[in-house]
Image (cartoon, helix red, strand yellow):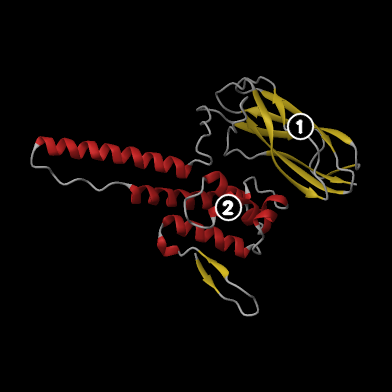
């Protein structure tokens, strides 16, 4: 990574990846510039205060340009800064950055593609070239999967799976709750896909607040829900003992804890503790 020196500051200050060193570095440069435009918050602050649902190490790696981050990590990086801090329209921000990420992914795939072999003078050499090309394509596909997948081992959601947020049934966002009290938050969701929900949960996927977090179970069950049906999911919450604010995000997962519908926005509650 290039560096620059600034008057009045000791040591070296990161200047970000060079755009002309490849599609991955170019995308990372855009992330780095976005972070600078948002006031250059620390990665801890992006998680704990702004609510990014990605690890500190994943956020940091995304802006270094050594490998293409997953879209999920990229979106959490962008969402809290471009839409949260800088106030951009979330749908427009998502469309713009999804396009930039896909262009970087496609360019990376093209860079990794093997060159076409020269014609062989006999059948045995042609066979050898064909086999070599097949092996190279398999390797390329494996690399693209690793670069494009958030964790590599997460199983894909079933085709046709979709969820839609309907409403906050209880405790609307911004509600005031007494310090040390217990309340029940309920959301209404709709199965907007063609796959029935069986054995599913909402799992706690991130939170931030000051001075303390709201206490909750790590997961709550989602009742069995057929396509098109609405369902209500509730979680019991214990407010911190000191006044402040807390916000907790939840994502749908299967029985093994694998996150499903990663591109669907998390449901959450946000309360003021008084």
Q: How many marks?
A: 2
Tell me, for residue 93, which label it has, or none: 2
Q: Position of residue 201 (x, y in %)?
A: 67, 27
Q: Measuring 70% from the left and 55% from the top, which residue is drawn there?
A: 45
Q: Of label 2 and label 1, which has the lower sequence position?
A: 2
Q: Evaluate whether residue 88 shows in this view.
A: no
* Front label number (2 vs 1): 1
Taking the image as shown, residue 81 lies to the left or right of residue 69, namely right
| Image location (x, y in percent) of residue 52 | 65, 48
Residue 154: x %, y % from top left: 53, 34
> How far apart in space, not on screen, are marks 2 and 1 (Cα)?
33 Å
Residue at 40%, 43% (x, y): give it. Answer: 143
Residue placed under numbered mark 1 in the picture: 217
Looking at the image, the residue that sits furthest to the left is: 121
Residue 1 higher or lower than 240, as above or below:
below
Is residue 38 placed above or below 78 in the rendered structure? below
């Amino acid at each position: 990574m290039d560096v620059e020196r600034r008057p009045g500051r000791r040591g070296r200050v990161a200047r970000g990846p060079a755009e002309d060193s490849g599609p991955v570095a170019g995308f990372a440069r855009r992330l780095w510039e976005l972070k600078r435009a948002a006031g250059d918050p620390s990665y801890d602050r992006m998680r704990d205060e702004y609510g990014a649902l990605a690890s500190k190490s994943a956020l940091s790696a995304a802006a270094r340009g050594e490998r293409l981050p997953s879209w999920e990590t990229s979106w959490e990086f962008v969402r809290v800064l471009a839409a949260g801090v800088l106030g951009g329209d979330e749908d427009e921000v998502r469309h713009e950055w999804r396009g930039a990420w896909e262009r970087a992914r496609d360019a990376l795939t093209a860079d990794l593609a093997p060159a076409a072999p020269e014609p062989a003078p006999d059948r045995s050499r042609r066979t050898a070239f064909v086999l070599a090309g097949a092996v190279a394509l398999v390797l390329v596909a494996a690399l693209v999967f690793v670069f494009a997948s958030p964790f590599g081992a997460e199983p894909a959601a079933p085709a046709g799976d979709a969820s839609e947020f309907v409403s906050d049934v209880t405790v609307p966002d911004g509600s005031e709750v007494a310090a040390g009290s217990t309340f029940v938050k309920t959301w209404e969701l709709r199965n907007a896909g063609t796959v029935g929900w069986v054995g599913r949960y909402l799992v706690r996927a991130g939170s931030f607040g000051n001075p303390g977090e709201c206490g909750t179970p790590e997961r709550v069950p989602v009742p069995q829900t057929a396509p098109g049906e609405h369902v209500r999911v509730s979680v019991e919450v214990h407010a911190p003992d000191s006044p402040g604010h807390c916000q907790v995000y939840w994502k749908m997962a299967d029985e093994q804890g694998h996150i499903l519908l990663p591109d669907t926005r998390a449901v959450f509650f946000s309360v003021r503790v008084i």
